[in-house]
Amino acid sequence: MHLPSDLTDRIRYGSPFLSVLLDREASFLDRLPGFEVDALTVVTADHNLPLAQRLRIERRRIALLVALGDLSGAYDLRRVTRTLSNFADSALHRAIVAAIEERTPGAEPVGFAAIGLGKQGSHELNYSSDIDPILLYDPAILPRRERDDPVEAAVRIGKRVVELLQARDGDGYVLRVDLRLRPSPEATPIALPIDAAVSYYESSALPWERAAFIRARAVAGDIVLGNRFLDAIRPFVWRRALDYGAIGEIRDITRRIRDHYAQGQAFGPGYDLKRGRGGIREAEFFAQVHQLVHGGRDPALRAPATLDALSALVVGGRISGDEAQVMAGGYTLFRTIEHRLQMVDDRQTHSLPDQIDALDRVARLHGVDDGQVLLDLMAPHVTAVGAVYDRLDGASTPGLPVDPHTLADRLETLGFASGEQVARRIADWRSGAYPALRSPAARAALEDSLPGLIAGLATASDSHAALLRLDAMLARLPSAINLFRLLEAQPALARLFSTILCHAPTLAEALARRATLLDGLIDARALEPVGSVAELVAEMSARQEGYERLLDHVRDVVNEKRFMLGVQVVAGTGDPLAVADGYARVAEAAVQVLAAATVDEFAQRHGRVPGSELIVLALGRLGGGALTHASDLDLVYCFTGDFSAESDGTKPLGAVLYYNRLAQRLTAALSVQTASGPLYEVDTRLRPSGAQGPLVVSLAGFERYQREDAWTWEHMALARARPIMGSPDGRAAAAAIIARVLAGDRPDRDIVAEAVAMRADMARHKPPAGPLDAKLSPGGLVDLEFAVHVTQLLSGQGLSPRLGEAIDALVAIGRLPAGLHDAHDFLTRLIVTMRLVAPDAQVPPETTQPILAAALGCSDWPALLVRLDAARQVVHETWQEIVNGTGDR
């Protein structure tokens, strides 16, 4: 290979180490065709030489090849670091194989693995970097001599590996090996049994060790064993429930580094590229903090390499493109110059030289004129990286007084009616009245987040009630550290949390049962519409670890989605109409996933009924695709095929008994509370013959009942029926029956008279719960539903189960007034929002009224009342026309 004279001049001037290599490996360079080669192949040394010598020669050649590729511009940073990392993997693996062969000739190299941490794990090794492996072994399969203890055998293998890589002679060395990242290095052997290592990381590991394992990889030895270990500790690294104590620990590491290396903080000669403010470590930690926050929920963010992680965080919407550009640009430049420093004498250094002439040599090696030009090149990047990283800490807030009288005065100044009562409650928290607040760390986290929390709660019309909701949550939590650290770290989330406690008792109660619901709101996409039914089914089905665990997983997902949808209304980011549709999609997906799982689990004992399947029909608000936060699920179960058939399992059942037991299981799966909380109340009273009939009927029996025996109110309910579970053919058959019945294939009845009588009976037995009862008040949603369903049955038109679509179709043919659609939308928005902020249907407090008005698209509370009266008037007049016989029968 011919090298340009400018390149060799730069090397001769700036790097004694590379100058020696140019001379020593001249014949190697002569054989190279160019830079586009397989590096590990072309550097291979004579196989007749001892392994240690071969590895040292190969490392020397890799160092030269990578340096030339880097300095010439043929290799970018990614290729440089990956080539160095690949060589380290290969050398470490060959050393392990050789160490095992020396002690147990002919044995398979199994049972001993190296986990690469840090830059080796992420394929980002420095030019002159240590490797930081953790050595693991499996005592059951580790090759060893007959009388060897497994621990002794593993330690001897580990020591030999280190010796092969680290020993120096005239050919140099292979790799420096640092084993101090293993658990408790001062007390543990250099190689650890895999079960003990797993136990440590599951129970005793420190927060910084989580960050270390973001970049962990099985790099050498028994890769299967290494991957088994990494799979086992994955929940430790990637937690679905966020751990803001760990995030705080990572930040503290940076602060301690800044303090310890204060001399290298000021940018200029002597600046520490790795540890200095605005340097490499801050770019790395910036990515890792966001990965720790979001990676448990989003596997796409678990990229080990810093540049890859930054790109993934942008794609995932976790950081801005500008932030990623700043961090990636700085990181790339700093790592490149760091390599120049290490090329000078093959030393693991990260600091710019103090002496101007030495800095000039590094600058010339990099390809610029002198040290000042190099500093000018770096300066804006250092400033930008430091500024972006500093924003992670946010602004500090003054603490609350400890003295009870001073605290009470401060609380009353903030707006609390009884400062003394609230002060006593805060004093209880500070004294560790609840288990969640008994550790010093928990109380420290409380103090840090308390000022912002109390300021937020003070804005409530009943601030004391909001405080009691927080108190109820703390009483139930096993630990409050994470909650408070989360609120401290996310000011916007803290404000939203206060809004929930102050204005949304339904959501506050959900949080009191399960505080980890708040974690999901860190994701910016939490305030976006939920996915399609198919996407939700995929998310709920993601864990197939047994029936019971699936039930819990579905509950987790449903409760999280339902909570997020409610927050969208309270936060003003989601139209209650869209939220109602989202609630319905979540419920439909839950029915599909749990039904499929229940069918499979039931079939394990009882088999399946040949030529038959379960069909689930949704009616009511679920059928209409518009649930509220607290809606029941109105379901009807049917089955296809011959009702006299029998299942084919080890414990066969007749079809009728089979499906009734199966439906009971499904109802329980949807409604029985577990450790993960409640799911839905299921109402099956709309089935044929109501509560007196069997839980499940054949599809033929369902059709016969609807055609011959059903009452008008049952046909009205059928107007919002749709199949949500079953095969395409099964659903189509059920939908066809519904369509035929609604089109007129049913008993001839006085529809209007029966509907009017039924509505009057409802009014007597279920009066409105309060003045803002959007459902039961005169002119409310029940009156609207009656008017729509009676018109559908009379006309055979507008037979969509979704009320909005049905109204539009009936308005288009002149059967309903045009204003009914707006009335429907307004009342639906009202009921969805009221279920969250005033579930008792009473007028909400003045401070909550703006939230309700905004959700309904009104400028203020009086405007809301005007629109409510108008909507009710339209509905009332429409229904009265039918009641009085002026509507078309």
Image (cartoon, rainbow, N blue to C red):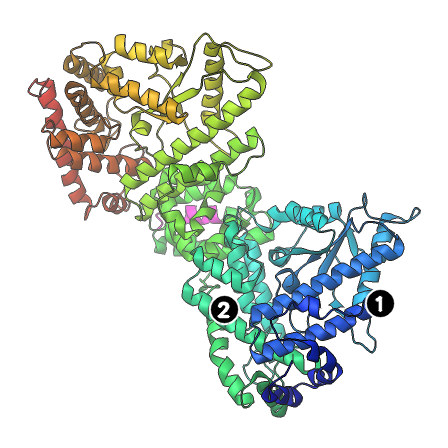
**Residue 502 placement: quadrant:** top left
User: Vertical placement of 584 versus 737: above or below?
Assistant: below
| Residue depicted at 15% across the width and 19% down the height | 794
Which quadrant: the N terminus?
A: bottom right
The answer to whether residue 393 is visible is: yes
Q: Quadrant of the C terminus?
A: top left
Query: Is residue 771 at least partly visible in the picture?
Result: no
Relative to residue 230, is residue 800 drawn left or right?
left
Q: Label 1: which residue?
A: 48
In this rendering, the answer to whether 341 lies above or below 53 is: below
Q: Main secondary structure of the magenta part?
A: helix
Task: Label 2, secondary structure: give it.
Answer: helix
The amino acid beneath tag 1 is: Asn
Q: Which residues are magenta?
A: 416-426
Residue position marked by numbered label 2 in the rendering? 328
Q: Earlier in the sequence, mark 2 or mark 1?
A: 1
Location of residue 467 in the rendering, given as x and y in whole percent from the top left corner: 41, 45
Could you tell me residue 112's position as x and y percent? 77, 52
In the rendered structure, does residue 509 fall within the stretch colored magenta? no
User: In what element is the residue under mark 1?
Assistant: loop
User: x, y (%) of residue 859?
Assistant: 18, 49
* 752 shown above or below 5: above
Neighbour tally class for label 2: few under 14, some 14-19, many 20 plus, Cα within 10 Å: many
Residue depth check, mark 2 versus mark 1: number of the one nearer the observer = 1
Query: Which dot marks residue 290?
Result: none
Residue at the right extreme of this rendering: 147
**Where residue 337 sits in the image (x, y, percent)?**
58, 78
Q: Residue at x 39, y 43 (%)?
A: 564
323 on left or right of 52 = left
Question: Which is more toward the observer, 464 or 523?
Answer: 523
Q: Locate residue 350 relative to residue 738 in the image: left or right.
A: right
Between 327 and 475, which is closer to the camera in this rendering? 327
